[in-house]
Amino acid sequence: MKKTANRSCSNQKAALRGFFCWALLSLSLGWATVSYAGRDIDQDEALYLVEQGVVKPLQEFLDDALERFPGRFLEAELEWDDGRYVYELEIVTKAHRVLELEYDAVTGKLLDVDEED
């Protein structure tokens, strides 16, 4: 009887250790994912990514944005967001609307257009 009780207790301890290891791993992986979501890319890294052909040059996106919405360019950012590189461009149109355009920096696809308040 004693051997069966010890084995059962040992199995429970192993199961608990396994659960805690799994929980710790899940939390650390989840935290790593969250910490990189929406990460701004600095100008040196952006230049490197363009030179390596990972992302398209900003000028392509500026030309497209101003062709779609004639006006004036305000600012741009390159981010790592939701597992991809995204250019965020802000322009003010001739009708004085401030728009934020999001482009996939690799494919060039326009992902979203939002009007700022």
Image: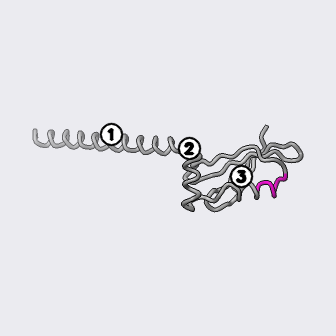
Residue 106, located in which quarter of the rendered image?
A: bottom right
Q: How many marks?
A: 3
Where does the magenta region start and end?
65-70
Q: Residue at x 57, y 49 (%)?
A: 80
Question: Which of the labelled discs sits on residue 104, or is there none?
Answer: none
Q: Which residue is mark 1?
A: 20
Q: Secondary structure at mark 1?
A: helix
User: How far across and how far down the image is residue 38, in percent?
Assistant: 58, 44
- Closer to the observer: label 3 or label 2? 2
- Closer to the observer: label 3 or label 1? 3
User: How far across and how far down the image is residue 27, in percent?
Assistant: 42, 41
- Structural distance between the alpha carbons of marks 3 and 2: 18 Å
Q: Secondary structure at mark 2?
A: strand
Q: Which residue is mark 3?
A: 112
**Crowd class of label 1 (few under 14; some 14 to 19; many from 20; radius 10 Å):** few
**Crowd class of label 2 (few under 14; some 14 to 19; many from 20; radius 10 Å):** some
Residue type indicated by callout 1: Phe
- Dominant secondary structure, magenta: helix
- Structural distance between the alpha carbons of marks 2 and 1: 30 Å
User: How far across and how far down the image is residue 68, in percent?
Assistant: 81, 57
Which quadrant is the C terminus positioned in? top right
Question: Which of the labelled discs sits on residue 39, or is there none?
Answer: 2
Q: Residue furthest right?
A: 95
Please state which of residues 112 and 72 is positioned toward the viewer in this rendering. Answer: 72
Q: Residue at x 56, y 44 (%)?
A: 39
Residue 111, located in which quarter of the rendered image?
A: bottom right
Q: In the displayed structure, would residue 86 be above or below residue 15?
A: below
- Structural distance between the alpha carbons of marks 3 and 1: 41 Å
